[in-house]
Image (tube, rainbow, N blue to C red):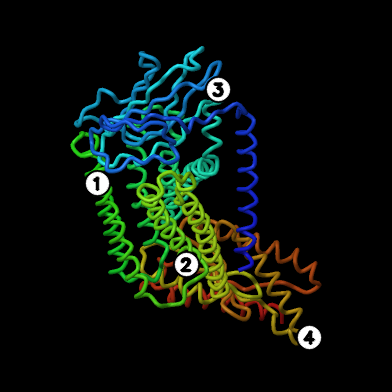
Amino acid sequence: MKNLKVFAITLAMLLLGFYAFFRILAYKYVSPTNYELIDNWDITVNGTTYHNVSLNEFEFRNLKRGDVISLSNTIPERVVGNQTMMFNTYLSSVNVILGDVSIYQYAMKRDEADDIIGSGCHFVIIPRNSSGKTFHINLTARENNAFTNMETITFVPTTHAYSYYTLKKASTIFISFFLVILGIILSIVGAIILFSNSHNFQLTYIGLFSFFMGMWSMCNVKVLQIFNINLSSCASVEYLSLFASTIPLTMLLSAVRKDYTPRSRLAMRGIALVFTIFVVITSFLHFTKIVHYSQVLSIFHMLVGMSLLVFAIVNLRNHRKKTTAEIAMSLGFIVLCLSFAADLIRFNVQKYLMPNNPKLYDSFIPIGTLIFIILLLYSFSQSTLTMIHDKAEQELLSYIAYHDDLCKIYNRAMCDKEFERLDTSDENYSLVNLDLNGLKAINDRMGHAAGDKLLVSFANILTKAFENIGTCYRMGGDEFIVIVPESGTPFISNCIERMEILEKEGSKELDYPIEASYGIASRNEVPECTAAKVNSLADSRMYEMKVLAHKNRK
């Protein structure tokens, strides 16, 4: 829990810092001379005219495809100089007429078979000296219930138009850019991890989901049109990003839970496959202009609802205690679901019950997605730390199991394991069996601490002598073995000579002799070709040397 608090506080401070910088930068380029034209409109809907109307109060009910709407007013006297008129439209073509001249058109020539019209903000440059002139905004609905209200129409100095629009949507735009950039970074890092032969796809899934949702949010808030005025392509990207985001999300939910049964995991991957097929088919239909993305949105909602039901059933069947990482991910998923549910309510309330309430214009999904991504990253970091800890613990246990605690070289267990491997292979090898002379006498005369020091010193000598030639093992007590592969067999005599030199040098440092008897045997000397037989032959030769050395000392 402490780690979660530190993680949350640090990330919150970073986000607030970047957001403050973003706001300050936006304010720098906002003009104080903006003017909102709300009242005194004449609105004509299919031939019926309503006079002296306020945009904050007027509603468009039950619009049908092809309905024509005209909004008329005069350019305010205070609108002087190089000005831009800004207004939003939804799924409608636009024709702006100043006096008797059309000064702006959008999608006026498109028919039913053309691209989706799209929605967004229009920036109409008003000619100089237009104050007091009458202008008309003519709209043609291209879908049923295309819109229910006309948002505020604003006049802004042309040089400040985009910065003004950016500031109005600052919070959502900031979150959108953050999600896109974060998604790109995480996707690249995830690809690097995968390139290193790892099977951990979680970071890649998080990155792709963050990127798709960031792109959807940028399109939804209409900021993408600052870079591309074509509202049709912006709408295509918006729907495609939303539809495609379900694929990495579903795969992520499948990958992060390790307790899923094979059937549960198969169900989650099946959902991902269904969404993949859905994206492919709907994209084909959309770009071939057969069926637009907007016309299959209800099917998408149905698939999402069914997927949530399957996910809930799968998780209810897994009752084991969750890890901190799984709790964080589950909490994030709940927040994401609540943000989608709240946004669905907001959308319908704004469209049908309170169309002129500006507080209902902005979606809740971007902030829900941001919280979800943050909790996912925390979940990923916790699971990664747990994995690293478990791996380190496993490596430590493996080291303890196969290494001699005193001499820090391989032990009998590791030697037996290597013998088993050698018995199943055809490679030739040699064994050097060694017995440290005088260990018992040192223990009796000087104590076991001196004996341990003798063992450690000899193990170091043996390791240096056979470095890059063979592998050293302590079999227990004063017994050691070196396994030398066929490539190192010609150098064994050189290694023995080096060992004896090092023994003499070490004896001077310890003030008592370091000396070992040894025996050498090769696999090709033993008919049975087993490591045990080779070891027995090397051991007998070592014993002969030991007996001879004992006689010489007498």
Pointers 2 and 1 in contact (C-beta within 8 Å): no
- Separation of marks 4 and 2 at Cα, in angstroms: 61 Å
Whether residue 543 is visible, yes or no, is yes
User: Looking at the image, is mark 4 or mark 2 earlier in the sequence?
Assistant: 2
- Separation of marks 1 and 3 at Cα, in angstroms: 40 Å
Dot 1: element: helix
User: Looking at the image, is mark 2 or mark 1 earlier in the sequence?
Assistant: 1
Dot 2: element: helix
User: What amino acid does circle 1 point to?
Assistant: Val
On the rendered structure, is 56 left or right of 18?
Answer: left
Q: Nearer the viewer, mark 4 or mark 2?
A: 2
Residue 326 badge: 2
User: Looking at the image, is mark 1 or mark 3 earlier in the sequence?
Assistant: 3
Residue 296 badge: 1
User: Looking at the image, is mark 3 or mark 2 earlier in the sequence?
Assistant: 3
Taking the spot 36% from the left edge, 31% from the top edge, the residue there is 43
User: Which residue in the structure is indicated by mark 3?
Assistant: 157
User: Looking at the image, is mark 3 or mark 4 earlier in the sequence?
Assistant: 3
On the rendered structure, is 456 left or right of 80?
Answer: right
Residue 445 badge: 4
Q: Nearer the viewer, mark 4 or mark 1?
A: 1
Badge 2, how many Cα within 10 Å: few under 14, some, many 20+? Answer: many
Q: Nearer the viewer, residue 264 or 30?
A: 30
Dot 4: element: helix
Q: Nearer the viewer, mark 3 or mark 2?
A: 3
* Residue 306 at x, y percent in the picture: 28, 61
Dot 3: element: strand
User: What amino acid does circle 3 point to?
Assistant: Pro
**In the image, farthest residue toward the bottom:** 444
Q: Nearer the viewer, mark 1 or mark 3?
A: 3
Q: Where's the N terminus, which quadrant?
A: bottom right
On the rendered structure, is 491 left or right of 346?
Answer: right
